[in-house]
Amino acid sequence: MNELVRVENVSLPLPGEPGAWALRHIVWSIERGAHCALMGDNGAGKSTLLRLLHGQCWPTEGRVLWNGPDGPEDAPLAGRAISALVSPAQQENYQRQGWYISGRELLLTGFDDTPLLYSTTADERQRDAEALARRLDALPLLDSSVPEMSQGQLRLLLLARALVRRPALLLLDECADGLDDRHRELFFAELDRAREHSTIIMSTHRPEQLPVWCRHVRWVAAGRLLPEGQTPPAESERPQPAAASPRPRAAGSGMPLLDVRNATVFIDRKEVLHAITWQLRQGEHWRIVGANGSGKSTFLRMLAGDEFVADGGSLRRHLPGQGGSTAILQEIRKGVRLVSDLSQAQYGYSLTALELVCSGWDNTVGNYREYSEEEMAQARAVMARLDCITLAEKSIRSLSTGQLRRLFLARSLLGGPDILLLDEPCSGLDEGSRRQYLALLDKLAAEGLHLVFVSHLPADGPSCLNRTALMEDGRLRVIDDGLTA
């Protein structure tokens, strides 16, 4: 039998949203070797459809049949047996749980598709895992702990975890987000090998990254899987964001808002950042580049007050919005805001989108007080500016990664911070949302907000960025002095 999965008129409700549907009347026959890309806007239902194919959720209407060794079965466990899934939600779960396991243990869980390693792994499997890690240039990660890993390093190991079991169906949700150029190239080379034994279904907002052999494209729109060859309305028919402002010159003589001197940071007794000296001056907006695991995310957490400088170094902050120079952590957390995958992963419980945004008033994980009518109104105004006000009363557990990206930006803007730190903020955003997001950052910069921006993709950056620094093995080097436009 050439058919691998059959989806028969499946509908699936949104959790906690009576009368709302995540998927509606999905009909799909997936044949072995028919590799396919799923396209669609944020919130269209792509991630939910991949979870359905994996057996992580099941329909209230219709059914899914998985064709395994014993023939067609409709039990979700049959889906889990023949498929492997890599998704932002899976990565967030590992970050949220904070399990202190090694990269080797994480990779070996892929053979049985369990979150943790519950049994001794055969020597042959150990060798297969190491060989795969070697091809992906991930051998050093096997002896690292998961909580120590960068976003890109964890994503790389989760991809390896899915590949190592050679599943019949490989489901990839925005798989390359967070990977640097070298590891992206190595991963797609490995994926090219995997297509000989796995049928690959991958969602993406970046069609330029699709392999040439992924010939089938299906669009998902408003929870419906469009017929092959049919696309949603053309981009020209959709609302367009305002044009970005031109790239300004840096005000190199401005007052330092952040002044880092000889800063070293240790995590679990391991030296991660080494004697960094750097300044953010008024009028400057920085792009920080570097390979996965070079220390970029740790650097941003240090600036935000989430990591501390070791003796012998210093980090001074001058935050006009907080009254000037300050070393008080509460003021620092209001004046310097960090938007990252890790901060998003910490929200593992159910809040409405409005409650999530309101937590930005105190920069807390969760809500610990009642908010005034004025605070609620300002939160709604910021959400409207980011085009996510329609999500206000929805549970964040029912939202897509891209929708959550906009909400966490809205959260970071409450209270008028002086500095915004952004760690791969465009991952998971569709093309229109990405343009809108970056255009908004340019407007915020023009209004006086200072940006420090991390991304592996040159196109993912607002035009206001006027300084660049390279992070290599925990050391920071300025590579663009910002004196020319």
Image (tube, rainbow, N blue to C red):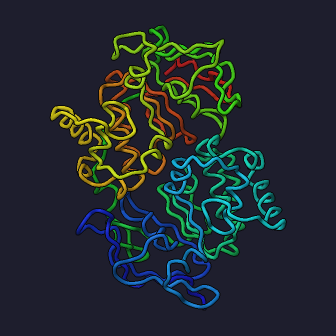
Instruction: Please give left or right for residue 238 compared with residue 54 in the image.
Output: left
Left or right of residue 480: residue 407: left
Question: Residue at (77%, 61%) from the top-left corner?
Answer: 129
Q: Is residue 266 above or below residue 359?
A: above
Q: Name the quadrant of the N terminus.
A: bottom right
Q: Position of residue 23 (x, y in %)?
A: 35, 71
Q: Identify whether 358 is placed above or below 157.
A: above
The residue lying at 53 percent from left, 29 percent from top is 300
Q: Quadrant of residue 271?
A: top right
Position above or below: 236 against 473: below
Residue 189 placement: quadrant = bottom right
Work out whether 70 lies above or below 164. Answer: below
Instruction: Mark yes or no: residue 243 visible.
Output: no
Nearer-the-camera pick, 469 or 105:
105
Look at 63% across and 13% down and name the residue there: 313
Give x and y (percent) for residue 66: 54, 83
Q: Position of residue 439 (x, y in %)?
A: 36, 37
The x, y position of residue 386, in whole percent, is: 29, 42
In the displayed structure image, the side of residue 242 where residue 284 appears, left or right: right
Q: Nearer the viewer, residue 184 or 312?
A: 312
Decide if residue 169 is in sight here.
Answer: yes
Residue at 61% across / 45% down in the picture? 152
How many numbered marks does the figure carry? 0
